[in-house]
Image: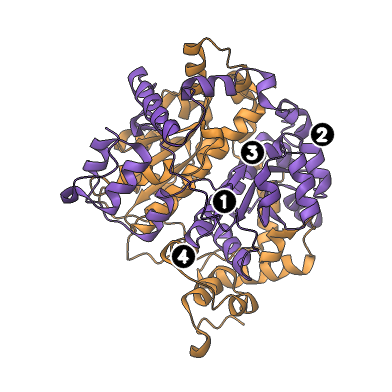
Chain colours: A purple, B orange
Amino acid sequence: MNDRVAPPAQSSPARERLWDRYRDEALADRLSSMPWNGALDTMLCHRSVRSYLDQPLAPGLLELIVAAAQSAPTTSNLQAWSVIAVQDKARKARLAGYAANQKHIHDAPLLLLFVADLARLHRISEERGYPGAGLSYIEAFIFGVADASFAAQNTVVAAESLGLGCCFIGAMRNQPQAVADELALPDESMVVFGMTIGYPDPAIATAVKPRLPQGVVLHHERYSPPQKADIAVYDERMADFRVEQEMRMIDWTEQMARRVKDEAALTGRHVLKQFLQDRGLILK
Amino acid sequence: MNDRVAPPAQSSPARERLWDRYRDEALADRLSSMPWNGALDTMLCHRSVRSYLDQPLAPGLLELIVAAAQSAPTTSNLQAWSVIAVQDKARKARLAGYAANQKHIHDAPLLLLFVADLARLHRISEERGYPGAGLSYIEAFIFGVADASFAAQNTVVAAESLGLGCCFIGAMRNQPQAVADELALPDESMVVFGMTIGYPDPAIATAVKPRLPQGVVLHHERYSPPQKADIAVYDERMADFRVEQEMRMIDWTEQMARRVKDEAALTGRHVLKQFLQDRGLILK
């Protein structure tokens, strides 16, 4: 089942990448002769990188990556997002302190903070003499989060295509007020997540994490609840992965169920609704 | 200023793509000798496509694209999203009817609906005997929207790398209950946006839309409010673009300010808070 070496006759970049992502022989075989290109290869090879060389990004790379980020679609061209690049070690350390003190935030040469930015649209509205009343609805918060996320995902693809590694930092929502203060964020904006970026330490191996069987995530025509058997198959594939990676053994389902079980499991993020409302967001 | 032909000595793929995206000579010059690759080229060349050939996707392409989507990072590997592929013409027409009856929804061979899916995690929690109480917090909705958006952006990059075109459909939030009913969505889930996909009609030209000057979106160390001059420059660049595209003339700032000015400007989406709460989301 977990033989990483496919028979040579069937081998192709598509087959190998798809096998790594799903560990599903049937899917990998079925798609083994599909067209392949550098963009697909970059995306399929994604893995989070948490160990970086002590080396800043080459000049211009940040601007190039942000150009890819800005090339992502945005809702009605509202461009309701910003990104803050933090390289100052002391500021990065303080931000790490608000985010479970994750070691890779200290170590990465660059920390990006992705902002759902309705403040810029508020300012533009004021200057034009409009009330900007739509910005206080959850609709606006949704497109702010979506726009920031589209941009962030292009950031991941651009960075990895250039040989960099990165890791999302959801823990930047653990202490949202402290993070907002540190970054001088205006009202009607919020850091949705951070991202560490740097040159991967070649001494630390990383691996592609298997995802849920495609049939669990991809539905046809209407939503179909997941089959227990498909989730069980994924638990097995993730167990194999955890053995290989020498990670603590726990079922994916058990881990996920614990991750969302109650307020305490949210590691501080239960205050986000009040935090957002205090900033003039999601009021309606 | 808007001469599309750069002096041959300075020309490079990076310079040309960056010029198209920003129409900023200085930035294009500064980054003209940066490394370049297929992934960057695909992302920088993005433009929305709304005119499609009457031709279904080649077999396997949808699965290949979804593999790229699933390869995107997800919050704590929660994978809190789903995608529904609609190809049935009658269903697609009904969904178009809920989304401002946009012509390209009817015409595209494939409509994808991206779902912030906390229902799957709710089900997993129940089966494991956990309450899943964290799922009713706005924190969970944020990671659901973010996970769906990361996946959707990889979908865009994968589709475009394969010669397909696509267009986000935010209007799928105009009548959220009708959309949820049509797709048999369970509670604790929501269609965040749709996406049309198909082979671009070569008879219909499309163009790369300029984005805000990089300095407006990229901040260093702390958030800095946008400079009026930078916004004015963007209004000028967008005006040039609108003339070239024979689009209705309106300042970008004016258009954006109107887009968020009040409840009526949200085209039905002012009901989203109640809709989400009725589904067990964003209660806390």
Whether residue A276 is visible, yes or no, is yes
Distance in Å between CA atoms under marks 1 and 2:
32 Å
Q: Which mark is residue A278?
A: 2
Q: Three-letter amino acid code at disc 4? A: Cys
Disc 3 crowd, CA 10 A, few/some/many (<14, 14-19, 20+): some
- Kindly identify the amino acid type of the residue bearing the numbered disc 1: Cys
Query: Of circles 3 and 2, which is in front?
Result: 3
Looking at the image, is B236 positioned above or below residue B280?
Answer: below
The reply to whether label 1 and label 4 mark residues of one chain is: no
Q: Is residue B14 left or right of residue A92?
A: left
Q: Which mark is residue B138?
A: none
Looking at the picture, how far across and down is residue A155, in whole percent? 56, 55
* Badge 3 and badge 1 both on one subunit: yes
Label 2–label 4 contact, CB within 8 A: no
Q: Earlier in the sequence, mark 3 or mark 2?
A: 3
Mark found first going from the N terminus, 1 or 2: 1
Disc 4 chain ID = B
Could you give the CA–CA distance between mark 3 and mark 1, rounded to whole angstroms? Answer: 13 Å
The residue sitting at 79% across, 43% down in the picture is A180
**Residue B218 x, y percent position in the rendering:** 69, 60
Residue A209 lies, in percent from the top left, at 44, 39
Q: Nearer the viewer, mark 3 or mark 1?
A: 1
Whether residue B174 is visible here, answered yes or no, is no
User: How many numbered marks appear?
Assistant: 4
Q: Which residue is mark 3?
A: A170
* Residue at 47% across, 67% down: B207
Instruction: Give the residue at mark 1.
Output: A166
Nearest to viewer (mark 3 / mark 4): 3
Separation of marks 1 and 4 at Cα, in angstroms: 23 Å
Q: Residue under mark 2: which chain is it in?
A: A
Q: Position of residue B163 (x, y in %)?
A: 33, 59
